[in-house]
Image (tube, helix red, strand yellow):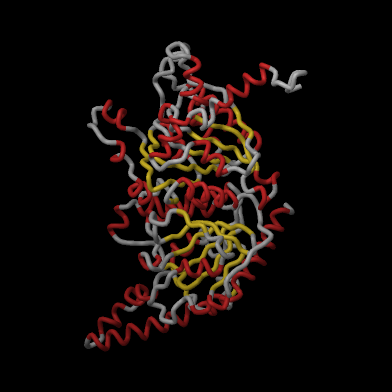
Amino acid sequence: MAEDSNGELRPELAALRERLARTGDEARAGDRDKRHGKGCRTARENLADLVDDGSFQEYGQLAVAAQRSRRDYAELQLRTAGDGIITGTACINGARFGEAATRTAVIVNDYSVLAGTQGFFHHRKLDRLCELAERLALPVVMYTEGGGGRPGDTDVLTQIAGLNVPSFAAWARLAGKVPRIAVNNGYCFAGNAALFGCADFRIATRRSWIGMAGPAMIEGGGLGRFDPTEIGPIEVQERNGVVDLVVEDEAAATAAARQLLGYFQGDLEHWDCADQAALRDLVPEDRRWGYPVRRVIETLADTGSFFELGRVHGRSVITGFLRIEGRPLALVANDCQQLGGAVDAEAAEKAARFLGTCNALGLPVLSLTDTPGFMVGPDSEADAAVRRMASLFTAGAALTVPVIAIFLRKGYGLGAMAMVGGSFAEPVYAAAWPTGEFGGMGLEGAVRLGYSKELAAEPDDASRAALFEQLVAKLYEVGKATEAAAHLEIDAVLDPADTRAAIREALIGAVGALSRR
C-alpha cells in the first residue's frame, strides 16, 4: 500500500518521490531560469513537447555523474540529474497513427548538466536505449546539444582512455533498421556532434554550432583559440549538408521532428489536396523557361504534406517527403531554376544518400524529373563528378522499394536515368506530361554536336541561327513524350491533372505485389 494506516505516505515511497523530484525543473529552478534567460527550453520542456501526454516511460532517471569520490552525493543528485541525459520510450503522434505504430525511443541530452557532456553513466543510459531501439525496432529521436566527452568522472577506476564505450557503434548500428532523427539547439561538439552526424535526418535551430571538436580540444591540439560561435555555424553546416533542416527555435524543431517521424508511422485516413487542374499550367509553354517546381510538388501533394530536406545543399535536386491520398512517399525532384535542373556532383551525392536511407527504411520513391542531364565541364570534374555522380547509380541499383517516375519536361542523358533508379526500365511506372521531351543529350547540344558541319556551312549568323532552331524543332518532334511512349521507352503520357490518380494506382499495385512475396 502507498499509505500507512494514518493515511500518510510510507517513508520509502516519500523518499523515492523526493529523490525523483530532484531531477525535475522545479527542483532545479536556477538551471531552468538560466536556460530561459538564453531563450532556450529545458531538456524536460522539449521532452514534454515531443511526446504524447502521459506516454513517457523513463529509463535511468536516478543516475548521477560518476563523481561521488569528489563531490557531495546530495549535490550530485541536483546538479548532475540523470547524468546529463534523459532516456526512455514514448508514443509520438499516437492520436494520428495509433499507439502500436508510434512507440519511439527518446534521448534528450541535458545541457544544463555539466554542459551536456558525456560521462560514464550518461553513456550507459545511451547504450541501453540504442539496444532497446534495435531489439524492439523503435525509431529514435535524439536531442544532441552538448560538449562531448567529460574528463571529470573520477569514480571510474577501470579505464585508461575510456574509449571502449559502445555508444557510437550502437547508434551507428541502427542505420537502415529504424529511422533516427537528431535535433540540435546550441553547442554540439565532439561526441555529441558525432551522434548528430550519424543520424538519418538532422534538424537544427538557427542558434546551433556543430563541430567535431570544441574550443578546448582545438586549442589543446595547438590549432589556436576560437570562440564556440566560430566553430560550425549554422550557415556553414546547412550549406554543406551537415544539417538537413534549419528552423527558428526548439519549438519549431520539435514540431518538425514529430512531422518527419510521421512519414514512417503509416498512412493518414483524412487528407485533402489542391485543384489538380492547376497542374496543367505550371510548366511554361516555352520550353526554355524555368518554373518553380515546388509549386508543382505542393499542388500534387496532400495539402501541407510536403516536407523538404537539404534545401540549400545540392540545390538542383530537391529531396523530401510528401503524401498522396494519405500514403507517404520519399521524393526526389529536379529544380530547373538551379543549373537548369542539371544534376551536379553535390546534388547527386545528396540524392544518393537520401535514396539509400529511404530504401532501407521502406518508403516508396516518387521522382519528378526535369533535367538536361548531369552537370558537365572542367569545374564539375574538379568536384569529383565521376565518383559522386556514380553514387546515384549505385543507390538506384540498390533500391528494393517501388519507384514511380513522372517526367515533367526534360529527360536527357545519364542524369535523367540516374534520377529514376538508373534506367527508364527501373520504375514500376514511368509516365510523362505532354511537355515531356527525351534524348541522349540536350537538344541544343545534340544539334551543335551532330550538325556542326551543316551549321558552319551557313553563310551568316542569321541563317545559322535559323537552321539551328529548325534542327532543334525537328529533334524535339522526334523525342517528345508521345513518341517516347509510342516506342515504349516510357509507359504513358498523362494529363497533368490525372497525375495523383496515376501515382495512387501504381503505388497500390506495387506495394500490394511486394506484400504478397
Is residue 356 among the parts visible in the rendering? no
> Measured from the top left, where is residue 295 in percent x and y?
48, 69
Q: Is residue 415 above or below residue 488?
A: above
Asked whether 335 or 451 is in front, the reply is 335
Nearer to the camera, 38 or 246: 38
Q: Is residue 11 left or right of residue 468?
A: right
Task: Using the image, determine if residue 213 lies above or below residue 460.
Answer: above
Instruction: Classify 40 as above or below 82.
Output: below
184, 219: nearer the viewer? 184
Q: How many marks?
A: 0
Q: Is residue 422 left or right of residue 463?
A: right
> Residue 20: percent from the left, percent from the top?
58, 25
The furthest residue to the front: 6
Q: Position of residue 236 (x, y in %)?
A: 33, 48
Instruction: Report x, y in % for residue 82.
Output: 52, 26
Residue found at x 22% / y 88%: 459
Q: Residue at x 36, y 35 (%)?
A: 212
Residue 104 seen in this snapshot: yes
Figure quadrant of the N terminus? top right
Q: Is residue 103 left or right of residue 195?
A: right
In this rendering, the answer to whether 474 lies above or below 256 is below
Dividing the picture into quadrants, the one containing residue 187 is top left
